[in-house]
Image (cartoon, helix red, strand yellow):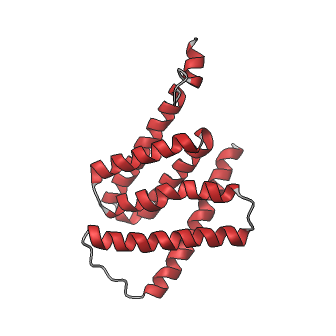
């Protein structure tokens, strides 16, 4: 067995050296991005979107099985380093998992309206869950003064983020 076949195919095990190398990059990148977002909260949405984009790229390169492994390692590492901070929970339950959800939904032959509706249902359920969990576990007693306006704004932002993710992935694969 020569070095190139070991790098590209591994030793017949779960991951090749190439996928371990990329996996470690994709493992550390969200940790660094979440750390930055904890120091600069204004960048939280952008950095979490980048984390999601990295997860989507990893899924496209190495498949769902290896990506799920990297996602669980990411989530575990973030939890060990940062605990139950809002940005950790946001990554673990919304942006980290959304890459898999988006991949599965977009692989199906659905109409654009059905696809968008399913994504919005996922997003709204996730936001409701996160809002409840953050208030319970992080002891944040924050109340949203205009919940209807906040929900509409969150949904618009989510649709824009989804379009940005799709366009970014398309642009990456064209190069």
Between residue 8 and residue 163, name the one nearer to us.
8
Q: Position of residue 38 (x, y in %)?
A: 32, 59
| Rendered view: 141 above or below 166 | below
Instruction: Point out the image quarter for the N terminus.
Output: top right
| Rendered view: 144 above or below 13 | below
The answer to whether 49 appears left or right of 37 in the picture is right
Between residue 133 and residue 50, name the one nearer to us.
133
Q: Position of residue 3 (x, y in %)?
A: 55, 14
Q: Position of residue 95 (x, y in %)?
A: 48, 59
| Rendered view: 142 above or below 72 | below
Number of disc labels: 0
Instruction: Point out the image quarter for the C terminus.
Output: top right
At 42% from the left and 47% from the top, the residue drawn is 72
Residue placed furthest toward the left: 139
At 33% from the left and 83% from the top, the residue drawn is 143
Residue placed furthest toward the top: 1
| Rendered view: 161 above or below 13 | below
Q: Position of residue 171 (x, y in %)?
A: 67, 50
At 48% from the left and 87% from the top, the residue drawn is 148
At 31% from the left and 58% from the top, the residue drawn is 39
Determine the image quadrant of residue 168: bottom right
């Amino acid at each position: 067995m020569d070095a190139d076949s070991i790098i590209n195919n591994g030793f017949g095990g779960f991951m090749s050296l190439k996928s371990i190398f990329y996996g470690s990059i994709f493992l550390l990148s969200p940790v660094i991005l979440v750390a930055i977002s904890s120091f600069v909260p204004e960048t939280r949405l952008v950095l979490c979107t980048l984390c999601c984009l990295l997860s989507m790229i990893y899924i496209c390169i190495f498949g769902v099985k290896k990506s799920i492994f990297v996602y669980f390692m990411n989530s575990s590492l973030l939890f060990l380093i940062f605990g139950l901070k809002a940005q950790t929970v946001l990554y673990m339950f919304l942006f980290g998992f959304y890459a898999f959800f988006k991949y599965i939904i977009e692989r199906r032959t659905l109409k654009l309206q059905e696809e968008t509706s399913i994504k919005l249902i996922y997003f709204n359920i996730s936001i409701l869950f996160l809002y409840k969990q953050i208030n319970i576990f992080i002891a944040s007693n924050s109340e949203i003064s205009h919940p209807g306006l906040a929900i509409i704004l969150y949904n618009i932002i989510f649709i824009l983020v989804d379009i940005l993710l799709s366009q970014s992935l398309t642009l990456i694969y064209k190069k």
